[in-house]
Image: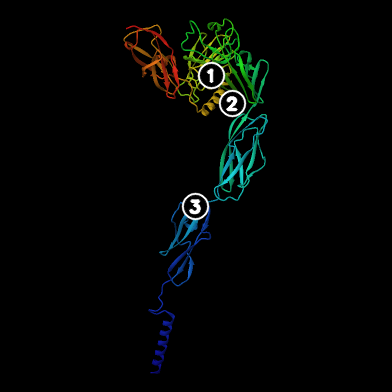
Amino acid sequence: MKPLLALAHRSAALTLLLAASGCGGGGGGGGPPSIASIAVSAANATPQAGTTEQLTATATYSDRSTGDVTGQANWSSSDSTVATVGNVGGTKGIVTASAAGAATITATAGGISGDTALTVTPAPDFAVSLSPTAISTALGTTSPPVSIALTAASAVTENATLTLEGLPAGVTREPSGPLIVSSAQPLALTLSASATAAIGVYSVQVSASIGSTSHAATLTLTVNPVVITSEDSTMIYIEAHTAKDVARIGLYKTWGAAITEARLNGVNYVNHDDPGRQIQTSLWDGNVNYTTTGGYNPVESGDHDFNGSPVLASAVQADAIYTKIQPLQWAPELFGGGSSPVVGDAYMEKWVSVIPGSNRAFRIHYRITHFGTDSHAVAPQELPVMYVNPIAASFIYYSGNTPWTNGALSQLAMPNGCCATVSTAERWGAYVDATNTGIALYTPMQYPNGKGFNAGSTLQFTPLCPMSWGPGSVLEFDTYVLLGPVSESRQTIYTLHAQSVDQSPLPPYGYGGPASGTTLSGSAAVSGWAWALSGISSIDVFVDGHRVGSATYGFPRPDVVSALPGAPGDTGFQYALDTTKIANGAHAIFITATDILGHVATFATSQVTISN
């Protein structure tokens, strides 16, 4: 029995040992510890937009142990527009702060999630400001300073590095070394043009960079020629000088300070054989038959007896010249003057300057004041007319239907008799020589037509500019004289056109009947045509100065389109005048046309007889 008792004792001891070591049934369980919670931590809970950082996910297990589960967790963001978080391979837990705001970043492992809140702050940012934003400098001179400053949208403590792109050849900057600017201290920048710098208007991009952040602003730089103005006993001059060219406009004081010179490198394109030529303005009246009798015609230069219009005032400024004259009637004998001059009822003022960024183009600004108390019916005016020397005998213009598209140009040999009517859809015409070099006239306000002729010793071009003059009428407008290759002149004209914002000040153009000398009875037709650049608003009929009604507008007039290419096809108007309501006898009928902008043209008066 002893052996059996000893065996029993050893078996009981083993059972107790197993129980104590947890290896039997019941007791402490046999699986690995489970995740009880996850804590997500960030080194910086308020990152700046544009930065990244690694978040850490730490698990606490059921046995109270801890472990890093960053690489095993699934990561997500509550707002990916504010912050995104990587969830693939080595990107797990890497947060990219995108924009200011709040986002919650969550890590999930073993069915348990933990999160942390991030508040993304704005990245340090800035804007670049220039003052002024446009500067100019002439050849051989230095521009006024431009202040370049950083305007901080959020705190910026670093300096910005500046770069300039688009400086033209021959233009240098100061400071010449590295350009550095801080939010506390703007940088003063000047630009200098050498004597051989390229003339023109340029967009210079000023870029500022701090790290990977960059912003830019645009500086408009105009490089001008050297402008010289002068006056002697007979002439007033304005000249544009570059290293290669000298362009000059000259006003002849004896003949109303009209433009008798438009020279490029010594070649004068303007003809001034008599006071009726030049580049000048003159006024006309739709009530006058100039073929049979002649009449009202104040001319800037003077009269056909070679008397010059008096210059009332003049000024020579640093960059412009100015004159004010009172024009003479072209035919003084029609106004009781015989061969003695007779002044007209108007003042003509003009300012001549060089177009900024050009050395071969001149702006002529006119102001014409009709101070007479009478009225002059609408008629084509010379606003202005250009007479050129036969060294440039080919007329170049754009005659197509799609202006301002760099379409092919047309060339015309002007006829010997007056006049050829041409379509000038781009509002300019030029006379050039065999090398396509010469003189161009651009008048933005004109109707898209012009006329010209070749008189042998001179060639003429007049843009279509209708006007009617009433008491106190004032007309202000610009016209441009351009010298050199026609291709370059055209591109300058395109630039001027793109800068233009004003509507034409010209009134409607047209004609209305019945014809003078007509006898009317019953229902008489009053008809005609009217064309306005802005469109017709109304056509009104007057008898003896009293309005009797409005005409119906919009009838086809193919004859007008044939005579004036570019005119609309529906310019006709009609009105039935009931003459039975008007006393028999002589009466005056005239028509007014008003455009959409309110400009009014008074048409020629018809003297009629009513007989019922």
Q: Which residue is mark 3?
A: 100
Q: Which residue is mark 2?
A: 355
**Residue 14: percent from the left, percent from the top?**
42, 85
* 331 w.r.t. 180: above or below: above
Q: Tag 3: Cα neighbours inside 10 Å, few (<14), some, or many (≥20)? A: some
Query: Left of 288 or right of it: where is 548?
Result: left
**Could you tell me the amino acid type at mark 1?**
Thr
Looking at numbered disc 3 in the image, what kind of residue is underneath it?
A: Ala
| Mark 1 surroundings: few (<14), some (14-19) or many (≥20) residues within 10 A | some
The percent position of residue 499, horizontal first and vertical second, equals 53, 29
Element type where label 2 sits in the image: loop
Residue 607 rendering spot, x and y as whole percentages: 41, 8
Query: Viewed as shown, does residue 53 lie left or right of 21?
Result: right
Is 364 in front, or is 569? 364
Which quarter of the figure is the C terminus placed in? Answer: top left
Mark nearer the N terminus (1 vs 3): 3
Disc 1, SS: strand
Type of amino acid at the residue the image marks with label 2: Ile
- Indicate the quadrant containing the N terminus: top left, top right, bottom left or bottom right: bottom left
Q: 111 and 571: which one is in front?
A: 571
Ranked by sequence position, the earlier of labels 2 and 1 is 2
Disc 2 and disc 3: Cα gap in Å?
49 Å
96 or 283, nearer to the observer: 283
Question: Real-space Cα distance between discs 1 and 3?
Answer: 63 Å
Which of the two labelled residues, at mark 2 and mark 3, occupies the earlier sequence position? Answer: 3
Of circles 2 and 1, the one toward us is 1
Corner quadrant of residue 511: top left
Labelled disc at residue 369: 1
**Residue 261 seen from this side:** no
Q: Determine the secondary structure under disc 3.
A: loop
| Image location of residue 597, percent across then percent down | 44, 25
